Image (cartoon, rainbow, N blue to C red):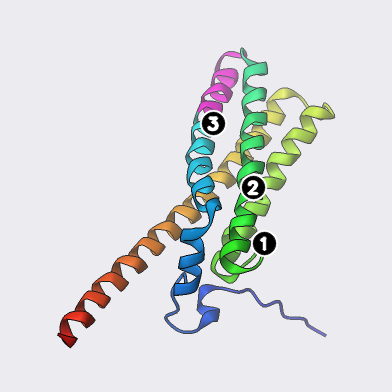
Amino acid sequence: MQVRVRRPSIASRGPGAALYTPAERRRRDASPWTLVQGVLAPLQFLVFLVSVALIARYFATGEGLAAASASVIAKTVVLYAIMVTGAIWEHDVFGQYLFAPAFFWEDVVSAVVIALHTAYVAAVVLDWTDPRARLALALAAYASYVVNATQFLLKLRAARRQEASEQVHGAATLGATS
């Protein structure tokens, strides 16, 4: 017996479905977690850039292991903050904490990102492998983060396009009825 797993998508709302329904957009705009996400996302990116530089320095010179390691831990803390508040945001907007159809694949990749970051923290705490291998794991976590950040940026762009299109369509409809 073969079991099929349904993988929701925006398309599962119907052909040509928008990223947000009007009610979801109102909830998104009213949620305090929207602003929190807007602050945490660039903060996480900044911590990521500093951390990549510190890891690169360690790989290039063999110096700065403590700083590189601390930067990955800091990145992980910010990641956990954005994941928790993002789940609350998703609940405010879509009525479920994770895997809402509009953000299903972003949440799937986010799970990979958090798993890799958590594996790094476990490796540090439990002193698994040597520092270079741990930092290589951090770089794998960072690669998955870049994929995930790209997903979210594309989703933000799609939302902005949808809103601009609706404004143009609304203006055209208003003009046609005048």
Residue density around tag 1, few if under 14, some if 14–19, many if 20 or more, within 10 Å: some
Badge 3: residue crowd in 10 Å (few <14, some 14–19, many ≥20): some
Q: Magenta stretch containing residue 61, yes or no?
A: yes
* Residue count near mark 2 (Cα–Cα under 10 Å), binned few <14, some 14–19, many ≥20: many
Residue 88 lies in the magenta stretch: no
- The type of residue carrying mark 1 is Tyr
In percent of width and height, residue 62 lies at 62, 14
**Horizontal side, residue 112 vs residue 170: left or right:** right
Q: Which mark is residue 97?
A: 1
**Is 167 rendered above or below residue 84?**
below
Range shown magenta: 50-62
Q: Are marks 3 and 2 in contact (CB under 8 Å)?
A: no
Report the front residue among 84 and 75.
84
Q: Amino acid at mark 3?
A: Val
Give the image location of residue 112, x and y in percent: 67, 51
Mark 2 and mark 1 lie on one chain; the one further toward the N terminus is 1
Instruction: Residue at 53% x, 41% y: name it.
Output: 40
Q: Are marks 2 and 1 in contact (CB under 8 Å)?
A: no
- Give the vertical position of 37 relative to 5 (above or below): above
Q: How many marks?
A: 3
Q: Determine whether the residue tagged by mark 2 lies in a helix, strand or loop.
A: helix
Element assignment for label 1: loop
Type of residue at label 2? Val
Label 3, secondary structure: give it. helix
Earlier sequence position, callout 1 versus callout 3: 3
Q: Which residue is mark 3?
A: 47
Residue at 76% x, 24% y is 130
Q: In percent of the image, x 58 and y 71: which residue is there?
A: 101
Residue that carries the numbered disc 2 in the rendered image: 113
